[in-house]
Amino acid sequence: SQKIEQNSEALNIQEGKTATLTCNYTNYSPAYLQWYRQDPGRGPVFLLLIRENEKEKRKERLKVTFDTTLKQSLFHITASQPADSATYLCVLTGGGNKLTFGTGTQLKVEL
Amino acid sequence: DAGVIQSPRHEVTEMGQEVTLRCKPISGHDYLFWYRQTMMRGLELLIYFNNNVPIDDSGMPEDRFSAKMPNASFSTLKIQPSEPRDSAVYFCASSSNRAGNTIYFGEGSWLTVV
């Protein structure tokens, strides 16, 4: 069956360090992979989209890699700040416009 | 743009009552999605529409759930009768193919069934 796996345990890092979150998937051949951020009590917000023929995408302090052989995406936040604390969701595109969300990894950036 | 607008933001209802959640998608978006989020199961897609037509409702848990989209600017998700296990946050989201498959979420409707 199709699965999206993200670390269920919270990731705690110190301010200024690079946070790296992992998304692994099985039984998917996604055309896109997306990352969203969700703050408590709010809806998810789109951050980055990477296509299957792209290896890496950057946006300001964010970087996403997409390895279709390993079936894995890594999401990096450099120079992390307490304001980056949130839950980050990996999202795959299946047939049509159907998006499937991972369960998310909670990131806490400490002073 | 006002974004995706959902109402009510919070609802507490008694078991057996009918619940109607409402959504106004972003103008010009031709896809509309209803998701449910719980701690146990994360975000689950319930149903989605394209140009007001339901495309995939395989995520709707049971016949007690129904969704409609009478026009491009309005959709409802109805639960009748409601049960305590329906307690969750229900998100509406919309997208346009021109946005590269990115979807935009509302702030959610927090439903508690007692």
Image: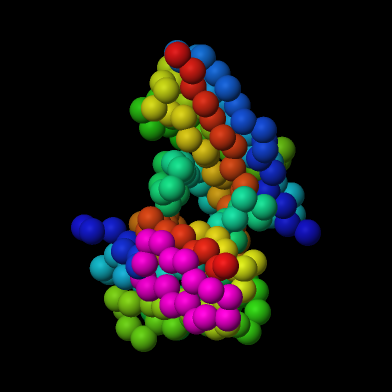
Query: Which residue is pictured at 36% across the width and 86% down the height?
Result: B70
Relative height, residue B84 to residue A35 (above, below): below
Q: Is residue A70 magenta?
A: no
Residue nearest the viewer, comparing A82 with A22: A82
Task: Count the marks.
Answer: 0
Q: Residue B24: which quarter of the image?
A: bottom left
Relative height, residue A72 to residue B110 (above, below): above
Q: Is residue B14 magenta?
A: yes
Colouring: rainbow
Residue nearest the viewer, comparing A19 with A71: A19
Relative height, residue A7 to residue A78 (above, below): below
Image-based side of A79 in relation to B62, left or right? left
Residue B82 seen in the figure: yes
Image-based side of A10 in relation to B8, left or right? right
What's drawn in magenta, residue-wise? B8-23
Quadrant occupied by the C terminus of chain B: bottom right
Q: In the rendering, at what x and y percent does residue A41 appear? A: 43, 48
Q: In the rendering, at what x and y percent does residue B83 appear? A: 61, 73
Q: In the rendering, at what x and y percent does residue B53 appear? A: 45, 83
Quadrant occupied by the N terminus of chain B: bottom left
Query: Which residue is pictured at 46% across the width and 30% down the height?
Result: A85
Q: In the rendering, at what x and y percent does residue B75 appear? A: 38, 77
Relative height, residue A84 to residue B22 (above, below): above
Residue B96 seen in the figure: no
Image-based side of A91 in relation to A23, left or right? left
- Which residue ends up furthest to the right in the rendered image? A1
Query: Which residue is pictured at 27% across the width and 69% down the height?
Result: B28
